[in-house]
Image: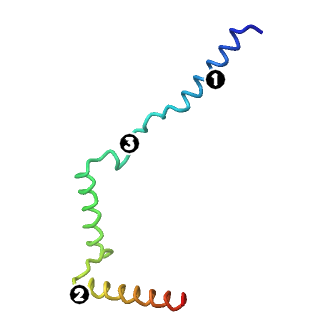
Amino acid sequence: MDNTSASNTNVTAENTAAEALIAAPARAKRGFAVLSPEKKREIASMGGKAAHEHGRAHRFTSEEARAAGKKRHQMRVAAAQNAERSSS
């Protein structure tokens, strides 16, 4: 075996290793990723309007939101108290 073929093998292995380290080209954007933020917002708005028209959406009143927040707060306080009791 001559040294030329051995050195060619080493060069090929180094090239392959170097190519593996180079990042692959970025994939092309598809679907909603291609759209501008304004176009995405417009499409989302149409979906929200359609959901309200079909009665599948709900808009909280300030009273409902306040009641939900109060309920969540009470649950968190109770959970903290239970954790405190079980750790004691």
Across and down, in percent, residue 21 comes to 53, 32
Marks 3,2: beta carbons within 8 A: no
- Answer above or below: position of 76 versus 28: below
Q: Residue at x 44, y 86 (%)?
A: 80
Q: Residues within 10 Å of mark 1 (few under 14, many from 20)?
A: few
Q: Is residue 27 above or below residue 18?
A: below
Viewer-nearest of labels 3 and 1?
Answer: 1
The residue carrying pointer 2 sits among few (fewer than 14), some (14 to 19) or many (20 or more) residues within 10 Å by Cα, namely few
Task: Please give the name of the residue rendered at 66% of the width and 14% of the height, measured from the top-left corner.
Answer: 7
Of mark 3 and mark 1, the one earlier in the sequence is: 1
Which sits in the foreground, 36 or 79?
79
Which residue position holds label 2? 63
Secondary structure under the numbered disc 2 in the rendered image:
helix
Where is residue 86 drawn, in percent x and y? 54, 89
How packed is label 3: few (under 14 Cα within 10 Å), some, or many (20 or more)? Answer: few
In the rendered structure, which amino acid carries the disc numbered 1? Ala
Mark 3 / mark 2, whichever is N-terminal = 3
Residue of label 1: 13
Of label 1 and label 2, which has the lower sequence position? 1
> Residue 14 in the image: x percent, y percent?
60, 23
Up-down relation of residue 22 to residue 80 (above or below): above
As measured in the structure, the alpha-carbon distance from the residue carrying label 3 to the one carrying label 2 is 43 Å
The numbered dot on residue 29 is 3
Where disc 1 sits, the SS reads helix
Q: Which residue corresponds to the image point at 74% horizontal and 7% vertical from the top-left?
A: 2
- Give the residue type at disc 3: Lys
The front one of 13 and 62 is 13
Q: Which mark is residue 72?
A: none
